[in-house]
Image: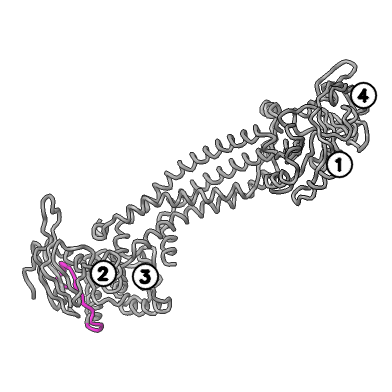
């Protein structure tokens, strides 16, 4: 379970302070499929960054299974992210010099997994996201939807408990969005992986189990 | 392995830029190799001309002779000394010489000459002197005939079978005056000596200066570890009677000339490398800055920064390695060719070199010692060029990098 307590994130503290997050309190249960919504600049991305350990809060705590996320050193945080959190970015952010299969295997290689284990897992994941036949293609040869599927497979490679997705459908057409949401929901339900998705996309909201609405750095609604 | 794979593929993301960088390294290294090859080849040529064609790689004299080279500072030619010296594993040849100066006269002309009494076989082993004889025949042991330099022969208008009078000072004030039959004319590789040298058998010279069984020096041919061999011989021979000197001590002005010229050459190469280094630095920095977001993503998904640093270093070293490898691949055969086909100068340049006592030839060497430092230099440059990009990456904040 993720427990977010009194998170405040203020930018430009010494000049004109901007409160990106303002006293955010939230609990996210294991296996949730949560959409974080709100207008641009409301703090969604900052919230995901802090939840993913990419950024530190100005104050407040995030407890994951009772352990304070931000009490880790920089190196420990990188290792924690590698082993426990999967990221899906709006623009896919795949390594352009690696094939789809190599992109998926990349995190596992950082984890020190064997070649056989990596190969088996990447095949399983690429099959699961429906592009098992595209493993040897470089990202530039894949469509946006296919690249985002590879990104999801990469995020799942390390068997994380939590996947954070920042506007994952923003660059996708309707069909690709629907397919991607199907895959994510399926993984959420079958493997009990927690998804937190920052989005403007109504289709994502429609498929979410819970929708959290941010405005001016505060949670104003939870459904 | 993954890092290496990514680094290698990253190189070819901007193929044109990488090839440009490799080309600049290629031209720098090949230029450096050729410059150094020509320098060291010329030095070796100078040393060979001086040491191998006359001076020897080391000499043994009476103590103090080198400071006061008079005909009176002679040593006795002893079998015991010869045996001791020849017992050293690196001494491959030893022979005695007796040198003096005299006035050479024909019926109408005179010229100051250097008279070298030597052992024909020993001299020939050191410098293959007999092969330089262009007319007549080489010296014979026990013969009173002489051979003279071509320049001297031309000046005095002498030929084989002519007779020449030599007049000079003998041992301890004796008068040295004798007629000698010219049995051969040689072309000495040292142009100055070519104009003034007179070789004769050692016994003839000893008779000429009235110094039986006396010599100025033992000339040593040393096949390896010259300096160490000289030290060994200094400890073997009685120091109060003998001095043992290597070619570099015998000709310190040549050592200075070589060192000065070598330093100048290295400075030029350093300037060349600095210019190249700035180009490489800008390439690596560009390769880094344009991938800031990518590095942010890599750290976000769990890649330690040290691996990113390794990737940057590997990318730089790969560019350097390819450049150096191609330089060697193309440059080494060129060196081998140039070594066996030296450039013979003609005209004013040739004359100027000959006047300085050097052969008018640009000699290259393919010695590996001049080649591998270029690789080391280039690898050091490549690593230095990655330091700032690494520092830049170390300062990156993941969130800012992702959203850059």
Report x, y in % for residue A186. 24, 81
Q: Which residue is mark 3?
A: A110
* Left-right relation of B137 to B152: right
Vertical side of B101 occupied by B270: above or below: below
* Furthest residue in direction left, as rendered: A220
Identify the residue shown where x is 23% and y is 79%.
A193
* Residue B383 located within the stretch drawn in magenta: no
Q: Nearer the viewer, mark 2 or mark 4?
A: 4
- Say whether marks 3 and 2 touch (CB < 8 Å): no
What range of the chain is rendered magenta?
A: A189-204
Q: CA distance from mark 3 to mark 1?
A: 73 Å
Badge 3: chain ID: A
Q: Which residue is mark 1?
A: B121
Disc 3 is placed on an element classified as helix
Q: Are marks 2 and 4 on the same chain?
A: no
Q: Which mark is residue A87?
A: 2
């Amino acid at each position: 379970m993720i427990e977010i307590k009194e998170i405040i994130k203020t930018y430009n503290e010494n000049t004109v302070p901007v409160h990106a997050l303002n006293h955010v309190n939230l609990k996210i249960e294991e296996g949730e499929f949560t959409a974080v919504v709100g207008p641009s600049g409301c703090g969604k991305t900052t919230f995901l960054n802090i939840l993913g350990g990419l950024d530190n809060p100005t104050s407040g705590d995030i407890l994951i299974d009772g352990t304070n996320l931000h009490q880790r050193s920089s190196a420990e945080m990188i290792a924690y992210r590698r082993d426990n959190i999967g990221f899906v970015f709006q623009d896919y952010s795949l390594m352009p010099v690696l094939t789809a299969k190599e992109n998926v295997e990349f995190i596992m290689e950082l984890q020190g997994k064997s070649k056989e284990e990596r190969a088996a897992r990447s095949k399983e994941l690429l099959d699961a996201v429906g592009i098992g036949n595209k493993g040897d293609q470089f990202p530039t040869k894949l469509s946006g939807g296919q690249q985002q599927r590879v990104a999801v497979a990469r995020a799942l490679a390390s068997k994380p408990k939590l996947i954070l997705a920042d506007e994952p459908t923003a660059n996708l057409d309707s069909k690709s969005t629907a397919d991607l949401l199907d895959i994510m929901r399926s993984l959420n339900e079958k493997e009990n992986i927690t998804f937190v998705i920052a989005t403007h996309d109504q289709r994502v909201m429609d498929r979410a189990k819970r929708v959290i609405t941010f405005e001016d750095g505060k949670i104003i609604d939870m459904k | 392995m993954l890092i290496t794979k990514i680094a290698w593929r990253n190189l070819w993301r901007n193929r044109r830029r990488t090839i440009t960088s490799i080309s600049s390294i290629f031209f720098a290294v090949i230029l450096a190799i050729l410059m150094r090859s020509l320098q060291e080849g010329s030095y070796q040529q100078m040393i060979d001309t001086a040491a191998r064609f006359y001076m020897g790689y080391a000499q043994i004299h009476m103590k103090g002779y080198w400071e006061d080279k008079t005909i009176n500072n002679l040593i006795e030619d002893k079998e015991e000394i010869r045996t001791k010296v020849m017992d050293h594993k690196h001494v491959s040849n030893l022979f005695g010489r007796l040198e003096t100066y005299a006035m050479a006269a024909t019926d109408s002309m005179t010229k100051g000459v250097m008279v070298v009494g030597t052992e024909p076989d020993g001299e020939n082993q050191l410098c293959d002197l007999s092969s330089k004889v262009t007319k007549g025949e080489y010296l014979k042991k026990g013969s009173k005939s002489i051979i003279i330099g071509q320049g001297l022969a031309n000046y005095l208008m002498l030929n084989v079978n002519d007779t020449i009078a030599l007049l000079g000072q003998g041992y301890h004030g004796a008068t040295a005056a004798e007629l000698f039959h010219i049995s051969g004319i040689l072309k000495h590789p040292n142009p100055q000596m070519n104009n003034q040298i007179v070789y004769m058998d050692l016994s003839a010279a000893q008779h000429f200066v009235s110094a039986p069984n006396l010599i100025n020096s033992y000339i040593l041919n040393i096949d390896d570890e010259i300096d160490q061999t000289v030290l060994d011989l200094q400890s073997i021979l009685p120091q109060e009677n003998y001095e043992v000197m290597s070619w570099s001590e015998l000709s310190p002005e040549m050592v200075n000339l070589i060192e000065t010229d070598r330093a100048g050459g290295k400075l030029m190469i350093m300037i060349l490398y600095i210019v190249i280094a700035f180009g490489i630095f800008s390439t690596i920095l560009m390769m880094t800055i344009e991938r800031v977001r990518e590095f942010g993503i890599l750290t976000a998904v769990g890649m330690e920064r040290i691996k990113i640093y390794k990737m940057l270093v590997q990318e730089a070293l790969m560019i350097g390695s390819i450049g150096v490898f191609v330089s060697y691949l193309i440059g080494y055969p060129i060196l081998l060719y140039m070594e066996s086909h030296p450039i013979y100068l003609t005209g004013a340049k040739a004359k100027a070199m000959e006047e300085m006592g050097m052969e008018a030839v640009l000699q290259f060497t393919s010695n590996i010692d001049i080649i591998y430092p270029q690789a080391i230099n280039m690898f050091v440059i490549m690593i230095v060029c990655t330091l700032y990009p690494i520092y830049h990456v170390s300062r990156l904040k993941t969130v800012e990098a992702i959203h850059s």
